[in-house]
Image: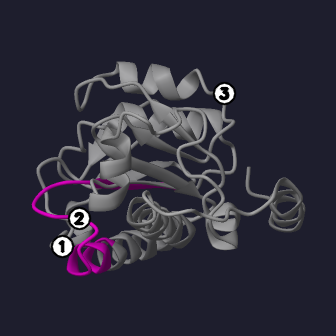
Amino acid sequence: MSAEETALRERMSELCASLFMRGFSVGTAGNVSARLSDGLLMTPTNSSLGNIAPERISKIDPNGNHVGGDRPSKEVFLHQAFYDTRADAGAVVHLHSTWATALSCLADTDPEDCIPPLTPYVVMRVGRVRLIPYVKPGDPRSGDLIRDLKGEYAAVLLANHGPVTTGKDLFSAVCAAEELEETAKLLVALRSLPTRLLTDAQVSELRNTFGRI
């Protein structure tokens, strides 16, 4: 096993445990993956993010074959589609976090822009968020729906299911997932109140400076 892979396994175990301990994942919900030079690492199926041993993390080769560790999450199609369409994606985080999942269930959530620009940090760390039509968990069609976006979104909400974020590396993808969840919480809390969003000019300035879509 390469030093790159050993370090990434340990980092994934550490960050997944952090997400679990802080309530971003419960039970066996959620899955995380990261790109290697010779494939992907992915959290195993039916595993708790709070207790993933580094050596048990699944390894998938560039052809999509399971070549090491425990059997990967059934959401592998979803993750692979992001890597296939976003060259800068170094990691993918899919959670069932409470507030972002709540937004994915609300009938009036804008499918073209689920997370309006409430704060500069959601623009910088998450970008525009698209609502993806519901398919059952683990359905290969989830990958088709992501590929249909042609890499134009770094984050999505799966309808009635939960958020998915990407990042240039594992830490960035985790930070994006956390920022999306906290922004979703703010949006739900402010639903009945007059709300001031960032202007188009302010959003453009942030995107030009920090580069998120």
Question: Residue 1, located in which quarter of the rendered image?
Answer: bottom left
**Is 142 a magenta residue?**
no
**Is 31 a magenta residue?**
yes
Q: 35 left or right of 44?
A: right
What residue is at 45 percent from the left and 30 percent from the top? 132
- Please state the horizontal and vertical placement of residue 109, each as a whole percent of the image: 46, 39
Tell me which label, 1 or 2, sits earlier in the chain.
2
Tell me which label, 2 or 3, sits earlier in the chain.
2
In the rendered image, which residue does mark 2 sit on? 25
Tell me which label, 3 or 1, sits earlier in the chain.
1
Amino acid type, callout 2: Ser
Q: Which mark is residue 50?
A: 1
Residue 42, visible in the rendered structure: no
In the rendered image, which residue does mark 3 sit on? 150
Q: Which mark is residue 17?
A: none
* Stretch in magenta: 16-35
Evaluate if marks 1 and 2 touch, with contact meaning CB atoms under 8 Å apart: yes
Amino acid type, callout 1: Gly
Q: 83 left or right of 123?
A: left
